[in-house]
Amino acid sequence: MAVTPPPAPPETKEKLNDPQLVAEKIKATIPDGVESVSAQGIVIKNDKLLDVVRYLHDGLGFDYLNNVTSVDYLDRFEVVYHLTSLQRGGAPLTLKANADHQDPTVPSLVPVYRGANFQEREVYDMMGIKFTGHPDLRRILMWEGFGDYPLRKSYKEPYWEDDHKPFGTRWDKGHHVIAEDRNPWHDNVKYPANFDAMSYKPTRELLPVLEAEQAATTKLRTDELMINIGPQHPSTHGVLRLRTVLNGETIVSVEPVLGYLHRQHEKIGERNTYLQNIPYTDRLDYFTSMSNNFHYVIGVEKLMNIKPPERAEYIRIIMAELTRWLSHIVALGFFYNDLGAFYTPLIYSLEEREMILDLFEAASGSRMMCNYMRFGGLARDVPEGFVDKVQYLVDTRLPKITDELESYLSKNELFLARTKNVGILTREMAISYSTAGPVLRASGVKYDVRRAEPYSIYDRFEFDIPTGTTGDVYDRFIVRLAEMRESVKILKQALKQLPPGEIMTGKKNYQIRVPKGEVYGRGENPKGELGFFVVSDGSPNPYRYHVRAPAFINLGALNEMAKGYKVADMIIIQGSIDVVMGEVDR
């Protein structure tokens, strides 16, 4: 499948993320391509979508697909795209295409952006919108036998009656029997005919194995073999299944099979009030709950047109950068676990994590599920002594530990042999697959949302954006290590500038009404760009709530990184992406 390589953006001083200006340029090139234009984006005619996107990619330098999602309105489906030029930066450009309810069909953007693959499959899975030209349009989070599309407004969550259950009732007489007393396999089992659980005794089967002399060939033959790694495997970092095709020990292809931890986060988000969604964001990437809260509330604050007090802004930055340092050191510890250094580096990294989690608990009352940010500020101020403890960490502990990691781990010869020139993702492929965060920057792309479109008060801080050169496993390790130093640099500045004052704008209201409109709020999470697309109809809960999960999209590039390497290499390649299945499956 041919994919257009990302071009350099044209030399221009025009603000090419302005919908009106971009629409005029599209009309000049594709006269019948634009259906309408507003501050909320450009609506493209369905049959011209691929032509328009190719023009934006090749002619105007929109080389990066941030996000693909959809909205179910009363009269139509709307597919929403967010595009960015990585060199120009700024806010993403919003494109839209409409599809009718009877036969919702939209052209696929995979021929232009490989990163559309997983995202379009998710839209198909949740909304039932078909993407013509997609190379592999299948469900991605729900199982293939699921009979409906959960994010459609017509979908009703069922109360399971017996004939609709995915698994039959084991005890159809209605008597309560402890399953463990009767069932050697425990839950969700359909018994064969005439099966007696009380008298059953399992038997072991012996498989016949040919001796070498009995074999019909004298030379080694290798056939392609499909194996499943996971979903119950310590190296998949959660309930992730990797359907892997091997030729001998060499990987031919690897396909992530997702959805084992899917709990319909977005459907719940549309049922909840805006405020109720904050603790649910904790459960996305459960290592980075403070950042998840942060990036959700800044999006809704844009719709509400409110700004937090100065003290709240600084505390938010402190929490977000502590989270970044914490997430990266845990990622590096688990990565060494994948390499075979069983537990020692991981235990050292978890010890440092404990110190930060203690601070989170002091501020929010919880170590991991913090539920700390609020629209317009924070749930509460930090306690007495909190700032002094953070100051000790950033002056003494965190720089020392980062130096130790670099000294002991990054120069280890076994580490270098296992990570250098392994799992290479070129700059072009990293952009095409819409990867983000350390995965993108390790491939040499100097892109960070905190710089490209500064949010909160990030424009007040001095920090660098570390990048790699090769895009291999080693670079992804080193970029995270360098980002830990940059987080410490930001923390020192934030602590020095932290003002006194209020931590909340206005009153603490349990119920809020967000004005009608839509917003794509985003920020630089430790895993990459975390985005929240929210549509408000003026009611107490979101009309549409979508999460742009960076780990989900980064995982789409795994096959590109792993092809041609060995199984042991694939384990560390997947570990270098740093996925958390709570965020991937949602």
Image (spheres, helix red, strand yellow):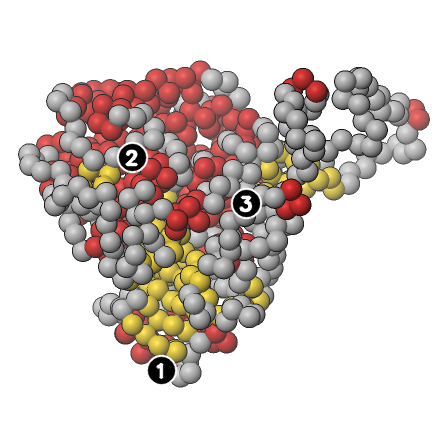
Residue 47 left/right relative to 450: right
* Helix, strand or loop status at disc 3: loop
Name the residue at 47% across, 17% down: 343
Of helix, strand and loop, which one carries label 2?
loop
240 or 126, which lies in front?
A: 126
Task: Give the residue pinned by disc 1.
Answer: 28
Q: Are marks 3 and 2 in contact (CB under 8 Å)?
A: no
| Amino acid on which disc 3 is placed | Tyr
Dot 3 or dot 1: first in sequence order is: 1
x then y, percent, for residue 185: 69, 24
Query: Which corner quadrant of the image does residue 93 belong to?
Result: bottom left
Compute the Cα span from label 3 to label 2: 30 Å
The dot on residue 371 is: 2
Instruction: Name the one closer to the observer, 320 or 29.
Output: 320
Residue found 73% across the figure and 39% down from its top: 225
Q: Nearer the viewer, residue 345 or 532?
A: 532
Q: State the separation of the CA atoms marked 2 and 1.
A: 49 Å
Q: Secondary structure at mark 1?
A: helix
The residue indicated by pointer 3 is 159
Circle 2 or circle 1, nearest the eye = 2
Disc 1 crowd, CA 10 A, few/some/many (<14, 14-19, 20+): few
Residue drawn at x 81%, y 27% is 195
Amino acid type of the residue that numbered disc 1 sits on in the rendered structure: Ala
Q: Is residue 199 left or right of residue 342?
A: right
Establish if 518 lies above or below 317.
below
**Residue 510 coordinates in the image, percent (x, y):** 23, 43
Is residue 117 among the parts visible in the rendering? no
